[in-house]
Amino acid sequence: MAATEKRKPRVLLVDDEENVLNSIKRLLFDEDLEVFTAVSGTAGLDILKEYEIAVIISDQRMPQMSGAEFLSRAEKISPDTVRIILTAYADTTSAIEAINEGGVYRYISKPWKDRELSGIIRQSVQRYHLLRENRLVALLTLKQNKELKTWSEELEKHIKQQTLDINNQNLELQRLNERLRSRLKDFLRVFSNLIELRGKGVSSHSNNVSMISGELARMTGLPEQETETIRTAAQLHDIGKIGAPDVVLIKDPWELEPEAAREYRRHSIRGQAALAALEEFNEAGVLIRHHHEAWNGSGFPDGLKKDGIPFGARIIAIADMFDRLFRKSGLLGLKDVLKKIKNDSGKLFDPQLYAPLEQLVIARGRDFMCDPPEEDEIELCMDALEPGMALSRDLHSGTGLLLLGRGSVLNKSSLDVLKKYYNLDPSQGGFFIKRNAKKTKDGPF
C-alpha cells in the first residue's frame, strides 16, 4: 500500500452461522470498508489481535463462547473498537448481559432491517474515528501541559537566579538588568510561539499585539513599568490556548461552532492560571484573564464593564482585534478595519482608545505588518551580523519557530541566541536587515 493511500476502516463479523455472515457481508459490499469474518469468538479474538478493527458485530448466541463474553475479551484487546451485539431473541436479560460484560454500543435484534443495520455500522465507524482522535488530542494536551510546566519552572528558576545575582553584584546592576530583560523577551517569544507553531494563520500575532499595546500604553501616558507589564501580558495573551483543539487556533472566535466557542472562552482563565506560580507575572496574568471583557459588559470570563475592566486589558483587547481584522484584510482594508473598530468603540472597546489606535496604525501600520521594498533591505549571512542592525523581516528557525520579529534590533545577547539556534536548527537563506534603519531599542515600536 502506498504511503499516501488511505486505509479502509475494518469491520469484524462474528457468528457461528455462515449464512448470517454472508448476508451482512453482502449488505456491506458497496461500503468503503474492509470486512473480516469469524465463525467463533476464539477466531474473532485472533483476528482482533492481528488487525486494527473499527467495529465488531457479534451474535450473542454462539457455542463455547457467548457474544457477551467475546465482546468483554475484545474490549481488553482493543478498547476503542465499537462493539455491536446481534440477538435472535427479544431477551432483555441477554441484552443487558452483553452491555454490562462487553461494553456494547448498540444491540440489534434478528431479523434486522438492512438499511438500519448499514446505517448503524456507518455511525459506528465514525464513532470509532472520533474516539481515536479524542485520545490523540488528550495525549497531545498532556504533552503540551507538561512542556508548559517545564518552561514555567525554567523561567522561574532563571528569574530567581538573575535576581540573586543582581543583589550580590551591585556594581554590575545595570548590565545584569539589561541581560535579564533580553532573556525574558526570549522566553516570552518561546511561550507565544507554542501557539503560533500550531496555528499557521497567526504567525507574529502575539508580537504585533504586544507592540501595538505597548505603544498605546505609552501614548495614553502610562508609566514605563506599567507599560512593560502590558507588553508582557499582550505577548502572552493567547498562552491559555495551549492544549486547545486545532479548530480554536485555526478559526477566528466569531467563526467557531458553539462547543468550540465554549472551549475558546476558557483560554483567558487558563492563561492566568498558567502564570499563577510566578509572582512576577501576577499583574500580567490579571490582564490576560480580562482581555476579552467588553466595555458594555458582554465579554468574558467575568462580565466586567467600563472602568471595572483593568486599563491594560482594555488596551490589549483593542490591539488584539485590530491585528486579527487587519491580517485578514491587508493594507487595502485598513479604513474598513478602523471603521469596524470605531463602530464597536463604546460597545466592545474603551472609546478613549480609538483615537490613539487610529493615529498609531495610520502612521506606522506598514512598518510592522508588511514587508519593506527590496531596495530598503539587504541579505547577510550569520557571520556578517552586528549589534545595532535591525531586522526587516520576521526571522524563523529552519523548523518554523519565530526567533525575532520584524523591526527587532540586534544586540550581543540576541546574537548569541541566534548563533545557538543557527547551529541547532539553521534557518533557510540569509538574514534580511534594514539598509538605513535607525538604531532604536525595540524596532518600529
Image: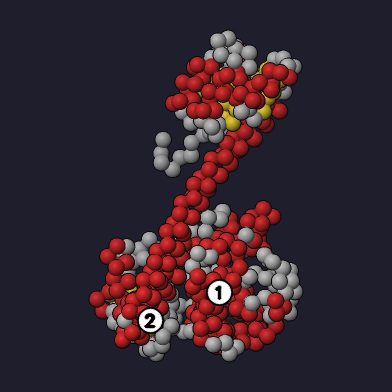
Splitting the image into 4 quarters, where does residue 83 fall? top right
Apparent side of residue 433 relative to residue 286 in the rendered image (left or right): left
| Depth check, front residue: 113 or 95 | 95
Name the side, left or right, on which 358 lies relative to 406.
right
Res. 432 in view: no
- Residue at horizontal 53%, vertical 47%? 138
Asked which secondary structure carries label 2, the reply is: helix
Please name the amino acid that badge 1 sits on.
Glu
Q: Residues within 10 Å of mark 1 (few under 14, many from 20)?
A: some
Task: Between residue 249 and residue 220, name the one nearer to us.
Answer: 220
- Which residue reaches farthest front? 168
Secondary structure category for the residue under label 1: helix
Q: Which residue is mark 2?
A: 177
Residue type, numbered disc 2: Asn
Residue at 32%, 69% in the rendered image? 429
Query: How far apart are the alpha carbons under marks 1 and 2?
Result: 20 Å
Q: Residues within 10 Å of mark 2 (few under 14, many from 20)?
A: some
Q: Position of residue 18 (x, y in %)?
A: 58, 12
Residue 93 in the figure: left or right of residue 207: right
Residue carrying label 1: 283
Q: How is the image coloured?
A: secondary structure
Of residue 377 and residue 302, the one placed in the foreground of this image is 302
Q: Earlier in the sequence, mark 1 or mark 2?
A: 2
Q: Is residue 57 above or below residue 233?
A: above
Count of numbered badges drawn on the protein: 2
Specify the quadrant of the image occupied by residue 169. bottom left
Q: Dividing the picture into quarters, in which one does residue 382 lie?
A: bottom left
| Screen quadrant of the N terminus | top left
Please, is residue 99 above or below residue 412 in the view? above
